[in-house]
């Protein structure tokens, strides 16, 4: 897909700073999302678990529907339903992502403005809830209700995909900075409550002209451990669940874009993973 950020950069207004001209959702997609990698993982894991290819997908907290759009372009049998409660973000996704689909692909995608706790959709092969958005459910009872509703929305052998992160740095205030094409991405863990595991995070952006966007996005989460999530999934009725944790280079301790199923976790300061559960 053509970069929405790149398109925006062509429209330069010298009277405004780069921050003033920036498109927040395009910046987010470039700095946070990797729909191709995630869907590669989903397809491979689903086939391993179910011995077939998935075709129907629901994306909770879909935001700009980037993953939904990528999904329907992969196979002419694929259908996607995206659910998000922010209408303005869905509208941006329709204008910048969905609009690039052809008529046939458009017939296989549906975006729904609703709360994932309440939405009713047709049963699908798989559901993904990524970017840690489900951590916004801070009460166990709410998380259990959510997982029960997800299970009911899956076909008989359907699979749920969640992401998570862990390590000692989860429980600390800190900043992480990354240079990208034309801007700098800053992830800030601004506040952490050690008694409740509640974490407040911000995403900031900085630009070569020294202008910046502070608190472009803010998240209020509870840091859930994978063992806690698996316990709730089991209570919700999922028959099988597993952890896929990020691998690290044994010589450099650098994180790799490889994930393996495991119940063992070495004590790295920060790591990413997926929790996969089957109905």
Image: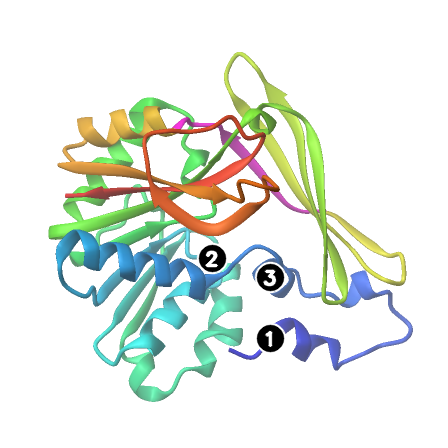
How far separated are the C-alphas under marks 3 and 1? 11 Å
Residue occupying image coordinates x 47% and y 58%: 87
Q: Given contact means CB atoms under 8 Å apart, are the residues at marks 2 and 3 in contact? A: yes
Which color scheme does this rendered protein use? rainbow
Q: Earlier in the sequence, mark 2 or mark 1?
A: 1
Q: Earlier in the sequence, mark 2 or mark 3?
A: 3
Relative to 170, residue 87 above or below: below
Give the Cα distance between marks 2 and 1. Answer: 16 Å
Q: Magenta region, mostly helix, strand or loop?
A: strand
What is the secondary structure assignment of the residue under circle 2?
loop
Q: Which residue is mark 2?
A: 63
Q: Position of residue 191 (x, y in %)?
A: 65, 25
Mark 1, secondary structure of its residue: loop
Residue 25, numbered label: 3
Q: Quadrant of residue 162?
A: top left
The one nearer the camera, 92 or 188, is: 188
Residue under pointer 1: 3
What residue is shown at x 70% (from left), y 31% (from top)? 174
Q: Which residues are magenta?
A: 215-225
Q: Nearer the viewer, residue 82 or 86?
A: 82
């Amino acid at each position: 897909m053509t970069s929405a950020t790149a398109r925006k950069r062509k429209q330069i207004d010298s009277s405004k700073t780069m921050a003033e001209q920036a498109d927040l959702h395009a910046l987010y997609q470039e700095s946070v999302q990797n729909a191709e990698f995630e869907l590669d993982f989903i397809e491979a894991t689903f086939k391993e678990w179910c011995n077939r290819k998935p075709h129907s997908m629901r994306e909770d907290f879909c935001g700009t529907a980037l993953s939904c759009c990528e999904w329907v372009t992969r196979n002419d049998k694929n259908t996607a339903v995206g659910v998000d409660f922010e209408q303005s973000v869905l509208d941006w996704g329709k204008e910048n992502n969905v609009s690039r689909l052809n008529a046939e692909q458009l017939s296989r995608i549906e975006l729904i403005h609703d709360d994932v706790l309440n939405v009713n959709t047709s049963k699908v092969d798989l559901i993904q809830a990524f970017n840690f958005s489900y951590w916004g459910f801070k009460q166990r009872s709410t998380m259990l209700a959510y997982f029960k509703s997800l299970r009911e929305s899956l076909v008989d052998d359907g699979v749920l995909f969640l992401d998570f992160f862990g390590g000692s740095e989860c429980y600390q205030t800190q900043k992480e900075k990354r240079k990208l094409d034309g801007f700098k991405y800053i992830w800030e863990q601004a506040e952490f409550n050690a008694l409740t595991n509640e974490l407040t995070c911000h995403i900031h952006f900085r630009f070569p002209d020294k202008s910046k966007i502070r608190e472009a996005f803010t998240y209020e989460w509870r840091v859930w451990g994978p063992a806690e999530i698996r316990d709730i999934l089991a209570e919700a009725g999922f028959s099988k669940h597993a952890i896929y944790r990020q691998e690290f280079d044994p010589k450099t301790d650098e994180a790799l874009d490889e994930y393996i199923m495991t119940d063992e976790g070495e004590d790295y300061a920060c790591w990413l993973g997926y929790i996969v559960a089957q109905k």
